[in-house]
Image: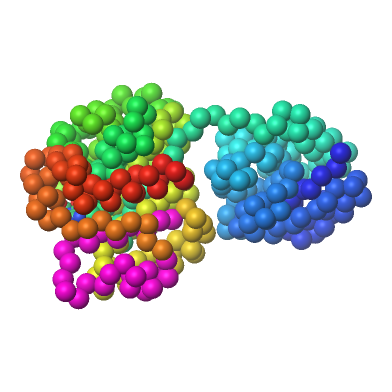
Amino acid sequence: MPGKILIVEDDLESLKLIGLMLQSRGYQIVAAQSGLQALNKAVSESPDLVLLDVMMPGMDGYEVARRLRADERTAAIPIIMLTARGQITDKVAGFEAGADEYLVKPVHPAELVTRIEALISRTTRLGPPTRLPRGKSVGFLGCKGGVGTTTLAINLSVTLIRGPALGKRVVLLDARTGSSPLALQMGLRPQQGLQVLAGRDPQGLNADTILTYADRHVSGVLVLGGLPDPQGTVQSFTPAHIEAIVRSLADTVDYVLVDMGVGLDAVNQALLRTLDYVMIVVEPHRISLLLTQALLAALDALEIGRHRQGIVLVNRAPTSTTPGRDAVEEFLQREIVVVIPPAPELAFRAAEQGTPMVVMQPESLVAVQFHQLAQHIASR
Ligand SMILES: Nc1ncnc2c1ncn2[C@@H]1O[C@H](COP(=O)(O)OP(=O)(O)O)[C@@H](O)[C@H]1O
Ligand SMILES: [Mg+2]
């Protein structure tokens, strides 16, 4: 029955030890010494099982497990977490991240082999496990303020629910409890909800509780917007809050869209680890492009896989010398998913009336581009 096992372990000695032991039982071994290597090999080698160490520098085992589960090419591969930590909370974290089994080191070779065999035969017998229906989570991150990030998140949410996500549940969440005009831009009254949630114990947050604070926009989008907070007195989310909120929403609704604003503070870094996909909002101007370059390098340093990033070019105010799509792609060395054309008049009227642009003019060029973007996100 033996099969192919991907061993993920940063410690070379342990790696060799486990590898040799399993090899002697007839298993074919593939080794990875970092989280990133593990993700790549899980795709290229299609192992029958992943043996995953938790404590690794850089990307830890929990994160590797989450990413394996999030990628449909690797989502069905059984995972055994192998760790020196035996606290019950660690185990829970392991299972939440997507592990099928959790073994505490040192594990007896006979026990390890028994678990491996049981798990592989269970998976072969049942076929790949049917995963719980789980929504998509997408963040919108500006390369700087004022480039149209909030406008993008709003218009996309409405385009989704009127198109590819018709009849489904779409939540639009503000990562900032204070200072965002998201609710106002949608013609909604700013609410205390996010502030209340920020005051709660993140462990106790579930989707039902969270959604009681959502406002329903006329389009059907459920909006969790922050308060205008000029004095900075509104309590902010901690990384644990934002992670708990996005995870529980994504387990319940079909789309969770998050307006991340700008920057890579702790909350946005937690979001980058949690979200399926992040759209980086870029303006075709020199300063924005330089900031984007730095941002993309930072995302690489944080090991946010490029398959989880997309770039949207928002061309709010073109001039005769504004670089076009090709020039921007060339400069950033990345592909652009969609270009949102300038619509200053429409954007202004939309803001004045608190109505999204795509609702005001569903036939406009802007709306057509939002459709493309919605399709792109829905088909991922
Ligand atoms: N395609 C567009 N054409 C023209 N103006 C736009 C466009 N998209 C957004 N805007 C305008 O740009 C300004 C900044 O948008 P906003 O979404 O608040 O940016 P951010 O969230 O990045 O700070 C707003 O006045 C908005 O109406
Ligand atoms: Mg904004």
Q: Quadrant for ligand 1?
A: bottom left
Please state the horizontal and vertical placement of residue 361, each as a whole percent of the image.
Answer: 15, 43
Q: Is residue 304 above or below residue 91?
A: below
Please state the horizontal and vertical placement of residue 195, each as a whole percent of the image.
Answer: 27, 35
Please, which residue is most extreme toward the front here? 363
Colour scheme of the picture? rainbow
| Residue stretch rendered in magenta on the structure | 309-334
Please state the horizontal and vertical placement of residue 253, each as a whole percent of the image.
Answer: 41, 30
Please state the horizontal and vertical placement of residue 135, each as a whole percent of the image.
Answer: 45, 35
**Which of the pair 347/361 is nearer the observer?**
361
Q: Residue at x 28, y 70 (%)?
A: 324
Tell whether position 237 is magenta.
no
Q: Please say whether residue 270 is visible from this viewpoint.
A: no
Q: Residue at x 14, y 41 (%)?
A: 360
Relative placement, left or right, of 151 versus 206 is left
Tell whether position 331 is magenta.
yes
Relative placement, left or right, of 251 versus 123 is left
Q: Please say whether residue 246 is visible from this viewpoint.
A: yes
The quadrant where residue 339 appears: bottom left
Q: Residue at x 69, y 59 (%)?
A: 33
Q: Is residue 218 above or below residue 343?
A: above
The quadrant where residue 80 appears: top right
Quadrant of the snapshot with the N terminus? top right
Q: Residue at x 64, y 52 (%)?
A: 43
The quadrant where residue 222 appears: top left
Relative placement, left or right, of 358 versus 123 is left
